[in-house]
Amino acid sequence: MNLQLIGDLVTAALVVRVFGSDVLALLRRAAAAGVRVGISELHQGHTEGKR
């Protein structure tokens, strides 16, 4: 292993350590938004069927 590779690995580890929780929070928000859209579409289809 050369010195540049070790520096890149350390940098990557620090980035994951610092921004890891933020990325997880963004993924959770995206998943929640997807669920909301799906539920909205289900309700829309349910009300259209009553017409």
Image (cartoon, rainbow, N blue to C red):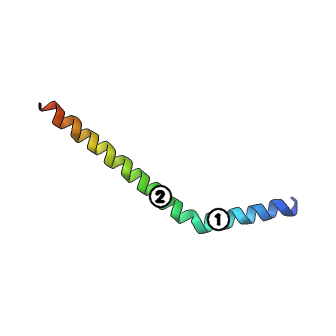
For the point 33% across and 45% down, the residue is 37
- Residue 38's place in the image compared with 31, above or below, is above
Q: Which amino acid type is marked by label 2?
A: Leu
Q: Which numbered marker is on residue 15?
A: 1
For the point 67% across and 68% down, the residue is 14
Question: Percent position (x, y) of residue 38?
Answer: 32, 42
Residue, far left: 51
Question: Percent position (x, y) of residue 7?
Answer: 79, 65
Q: Quadrant of the N terminus?
A: bottom right
Indicate the secondary structure of the residue bearing disc 2. Answer: helix
On the image, which quarter does residue 43 sit in? top left
Q: Give whichever of discs 1 and 2 has the lower sequence position.
A: 1
For the point 68% across and 64% down, the residue is 13
- Residue 49's place in the image compared with 43, above or below, is above
**10 Å crowding of disc 2: few (<14), some (14-19), many (20+):** few
Residue, far right: 2
Q: Which numbered marker is on residue 26?
A: 2
For the point 88% across and 60% down, the residue is 2
Q: Quadrant of the C terminus?
A: top left
Question: Percent position (x, y) of residue 47?
Answer: 16, 37
Indicate the secondary structure of the residue bearing disc 1. Answer: helix
Q: Left or right: 35 with respect to 9?
A: left
Q: In this orientation, which residue lies closer to the viewer: 48 or 25?
A: 48
Q: Which amino acid type is marked by label 1?
A: Val
Question: Percent position (x, y) of residue 27?
Answer: 47, 55
